[in-house]
Image: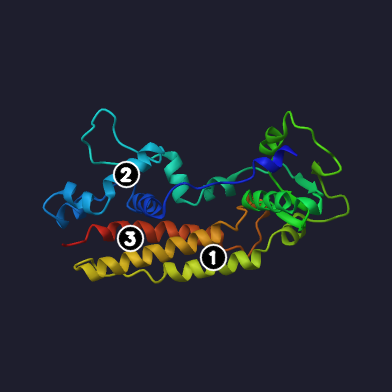
Amino acid sequence: MAILGLISYPSNVKPKTEELINLLLWSAEKLVRPTFRNLTDSYESWAYRNSLLKQTAVLESKQLIERNPAAPDDRMYRLTWQGRLHALGGRDPQARWSREWDGRWRLVLFDVPTTQNTHRARLRRYLRDKGFGFLQNSVWITPDSLEDERRILVGGKINVESLLLLEARPCAGESAAEIVAGAWDFERINQRYARHLKILGERPGDALRNEAAAKALLRWATAEREAWLDAVTIDPLLPARILPPDYLGQQAWRRRVEVLRDAGQQMHTFIA
């Protein structure tokens, strides 16, 4: 099956450069010039010692950040659209929640032989990473179009006894809420968002008047990002009209925007 050969989302961005992407997003998409300039005798020497120039070069080559091409000496970097998306965990929550839903469910049904366990595991990982829910291990469901999957399969020979893509509507009175509850583990998703909300509430609020305070804020920022990614990567980010009423994702997102905005302002209080 053609789909089995194209089911991974490899990440070739190293942790330190990922941290820089998040820092750029956190600080309103700007490299925080006032703080960096105070740290050493020159920005360049600070950047060299911290491998910042190497990291920014990597991010520029991957088109995750950009500068004004008309000013090659400009120190102002901005996140590209791809960079912002990467910093958010690969998907824009607001765009996902606000998308329309036509009331139809799309299903992927497959029966990969036990002799192809690796292929079956890759297919399940692909579907999970794409936000599909599963009603059974071989019956996966999404409210979204299967255009990506159809494109992958174009020109390939499809064995309908092994893989089937369907569009369907419930016909026995099943509600969308019941289908959502059966396909996704929102109790687990909410537990992770609750942990993230707790960490958001633990942001150190003091002015950054010494190195210890600055490091405490950076440690918190690392913990916050890890908690956010831990939650959002298992969240299908369903259209708002079919989200469970007790869903915490939107609350966590709104609070995150507020807290990171305040944290970005806090960074400007750093005194070397």
Q: How many numbered circles does the render carry?
A: 3
Q: Position of residue 194 (x, y in %)?
A: 53, 69
Q: Quadrant of residue 177?
A: bottom right
Of label 3 and label 2, which has the lower sequence position? 2
The residue at the point 70 percent across, 40 percent down is 3
Q: Badge 1 is on which residue?
A: 193
Name which residue type carries label 3: Ala
The answer to whether the residue labelled 3 contacts the one labelled 2, judged by CB atoms less than 8 Å apart, is: no
Q: Residue furthest right?
A: 172
Q: Is residue 20 above or below residue 82?
A: below
Categorize mark 3 by other alpha carbons within 10 Å: few (<14), some (14-19), many (20+).
some
**Callout 2 secondary element:** helix
Residue 234 located left or right of residue 171: left
Query: Residue 263, labelled with which disc?
Result: 3
Categorize mark 1 by other alpha carbons within 10 Å: few (<14), some (14-19), many (20+).
many
The residue at the point 26 percent across, 41 percent down is 76
Q: Badge 2 is on which residue?
A: 56
Categorize mark 2 by other alpha carbons within 10 Å: few (<14), some (14-19), many (20+).
some
The residue at the point 75 percent across, 32 percent down is 156
Residue 268 located left or right of residue 191: left
Q: Position of residue 238 (x, y in %)?
A: 64, 52
Who is closer to the viewer here, 242 or 237?
237
Q: Position of residue 227 (x, y in %)?
A: 48, 64
Of label 1 and label 3, which has the lower sequence position? 1
The answer to whether the residue labelled 2 contacts the one labelled 1, judged by CB atoms less than 8 Å apart, is: no
The residue at the point 53 percent across, 62 percent down is 230
